[in-house]
Amino acid sequence: MAYRIVDADYVLDNLGVLPLVDVRPGFMYEESRIPGAISIQLIEAKESPRDTAECFVEGFTKAGLGPEDEFIVYCYDGGLAREACDLLESQGYTGQQCYAGSWVGWISDDTRPIEE
């Protein structure tokens, strides 16, 4: 594991500075998200008849995020975010950072902003 694990304070300090990628299913993203996050769904890539890694990386390419770009990945509770970061690492990505607390950690403090 070469990517960095980050916490909520780091995410808060970098809102609007680093791209934030929400890998949760689309319905969760549509309901609410960390402000400024873009949706690149890992589950959708896994369910695709195409190669999972190819499909997932395509989402990053479309979002303008390349293998050396820095960005933060989060999901619902951290598990999918780690899986996403591992998958990206296997595809040569080096700038991803995993927000381990993810959505559950983010909403545990009602002073943190959310976008609906």
Image (cartoon, rainbow, N blue to C red):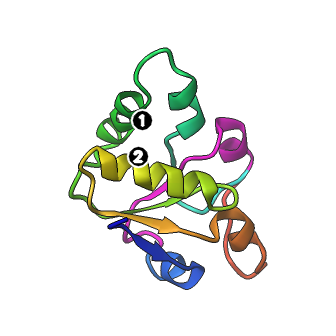
Q: Residue at x 72, y 37 (%)?
A: 27
Residue 9, horizontal then vertical, whole percent? 55, 85
Q: Residue at x 42, y 53 (%)?
A: 86
Residue 99, horizontal then vertical, whole percent? 53, 69
- Classify mark 2: residues with Cα within 10 Å, few (<14), some (14-19) or many (20+): some
- The alpha-carbon separation of the residues under discs 1 and 2 comes to 9 Å
Q: Quadrant of residue 112?
A: bottom right
User: Where is 12 relative to 107, above or below?
Assistant: below
Asked if the residue at tag 2 contacts the one at tag 1, i.e. Cβ–Cβ closer than 8 Å, the answer is: yes
The residue identified by callout 2 is 87
Disc 1 versus disc 2: nearer the observer: 2
Q: Amino acid at mark 2?
A: Leu
Which residue is nearer to you in this view: 109 or 101? 101
Q: Secondary structure at mark 1?
A: helix
Q: Is residue 19 rendered magenta in the image?
A: yes
Which residue is nearer to you in this view: 43 or 107? 43
Left or right relative to 110: residue 37: left
The residue identified by callout 1 is 56
User: Where is 30 relative to 20, above or below?
Assistant: above
Which residue is nearer to you in this view: 90 or 18? 90
User: Where is 38 relative to 8, above or below?
Assistant: above
Q: Residue at x 30, y 64 (%)?
A: 70
Left or right relative to 40: residue 53: left
Q: Residue at x 23, y 49 (%)?
A: 92
Residue 98, horizontal then vertical, whole percent? 48, 66
Nearest to N terminus: mark 1 or mark 2: 1
Which residue lies most toward the front here? 1
Q: Is residue 35 rendered magenta in the image?
A: no
Q: Amino acid at mark 1?
A: Phe
Q: Which residues are magenta?
A: 15-31
Left or right relative to 110: residue 113: left
Which residue lies most toward the top here? 49
